[in-house]
Image (cartoon, helix red, strand yellow):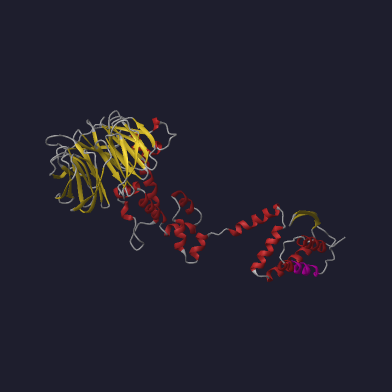
Amino acid sequence: MRTATQGWVSIFASSFGRNNNMEPEMEDKTLELMNMTVMEPQNNHSDELSPKKTTVFKLGNGVVSASRKRPSQCNFDKEKDVCIQLFDQWSEGDQVEFVEHLISRMCHYQHGHINSYLKPMLQRDFITALPARGLDHIAENILSFLDARSLCSAELVCKEWQRVISEGMLWKKLIERMVRTDPLWKGLSERHQWEKYLFKNRTVEVPPNSYYHSLYPKIIQDIETIEANWRCGRHNLQRIQCRSENSKGVYCLQYDDEKIISGLRDNSIKIWDKQSLECLKILTGHTGSVLCLQYDERVIVTGSSDSTVRVWDVTSGEVLNTLIHHNEAVLHLRFCNGLMVTCSKDRSIAVWDMASPTDISLRRVLVGHRAAVNVVDFDDKYIVSASGDRTIKVWSTSTCEFVRTLNGHKRGIACLQYRDRLVVSGSSDNTIRLWDIECGACLRVLEGHEELVRCIRFDNKRIVSGAYDGKIKVWDLQAALDPRAPASTLCLRTLVEHSGRVFRLQFDEFQIISSSHDDTILIWDFLNVSANGQSEGRSPSRTYTYISR
């Protein structure tokens, strides 16, 4: 009977000897290892063999099954020690190469064992290890990318992870990230006054991390409540009675946190305090109804049925410039980043360069519509116009050249908004259409209004429309863009409060502000909803304070 050592060396040598791809240097190392093993003294009890075992060796061209008996434990330990001693003398690169050769000769079952052994060795708690090396900021930066659910789980891993999260103020950073990227969060931070605790460096005294940890679920609850209010139509309503002197009607408006600026049928522009609803200032100068307006931090620009465009100082109310170009009523205008676009009942579109409020020059006149151009919108890529001729036309902003026409409405188009690839339009055919501006395809038709759709706005979640039927409808934008969504699920709520045609509206995450032929401006507040706010039908009856001047 061969001794156990001789058998082990024979199999070991056989398995390596059959590898035709072995590099000469590695073959030398293998032979060296085997020679040192053979030189070991024989154990007197080498005949005592452990139970018989079958080992599968994977060779260069296939798998060879070799049946052998394991040597006694004493011999195995000695042979193993010798192998380890020689292995330790090699460089790291040689060791890796040798182990790769060994692994290539093992079967799948053995690979599984090795994998299970290596897994925990390869795992590293880097969040704990980094602070130990003075790299707390790196651990904090890594964890700062977690969402709220993951951050909660990370706090429970161990005390060290909890310490890194607490000292790194990671709940504060998470809230700050949401405020920077989400308008709803930003609005809540301003309205609920916790923005003063954000975006402060560590040298400024701020609440502890626990404050922000407890604040986060409160914010989520507020957001869920607001979304539920929108879906159910729960709101508080405030009303401004404009009390026009002669002809009634509020044709246009724009608002911010402090004020509402409105253009009226009686030729005036009225500025209202958004908190007290008091009329702060009245601007006069137009000789016709004020049909459109837009303002920024410096100027108010208005268009009128007197065919002129006027530029006003937003603070003093002084007229800075009057543009006389269109032959008939100026129906709509937009300005941004030194460019202004106006459109008119005279069927034309005028593109203006705005160097300053007093230095505005005509760049180009766009013609192509066969009826009054009711609305325009633009960005850096396209100018979009809609007309009573039932078409939407797309023009290049940079060259002012015509690009394409969007056809589909059965009657004239009264309103439109354009952003990114999406155009949403409202028409006197009582429908709303969604378009892809790049290919000109109509993505969806929304039906529900009973008369002309006069105004429309959309954000990332909702479309809000107002019509001559006196109704304001709230639509689910994401569902409208999904061709699988049933038409019956698209209109979330119909709001009925105006007693006349709805002329203009604007909205944000918390409110809708609308104006009407009934000479009122309504503020629909979905944030500060009273306990008796109703979800169906008309808003609850209230006593309103009408303030006019």
Visible residue check, residue 526: no
Q: Quadrant of residue 92?
A: bottom right
Q: Quadrant of residue 245?
A: top left
- Residue found at x 68% / y 61%: 100
The chief SS type of the magenta part is helix
- Residue found at x 44% / y 34%: 484
Q: Residue 516, percent across and down? A: 22, 35
- Quarter that holds the C terminus: top left
Front residue of 158 and 182: 182
What range is drawn magenta here?
A: 30-40
Queried whether the magenta region covers residue 37, the answer comes back as yes
Q: Is residue 498 left or right of residue 29?
A: left
Q: Residue 440, percent across and down? A: 38, 39
Q: Residue 429, percent across and down? A: 30, 30
Queried whether the magenta region covers residue 34, the answer comes back as yes
Above or below: residue 482 compared with residue 105: above
Front residue of 417 and 50: 417
Visible residue check, residue 308: yes
The residue lying furthest to the bottom in this view is: 89
Above or below: residue 248 compared with residue 103: above
The residue lying furthest to the top in this view is: 450
- Residue found at x 32% / y 53%: 195
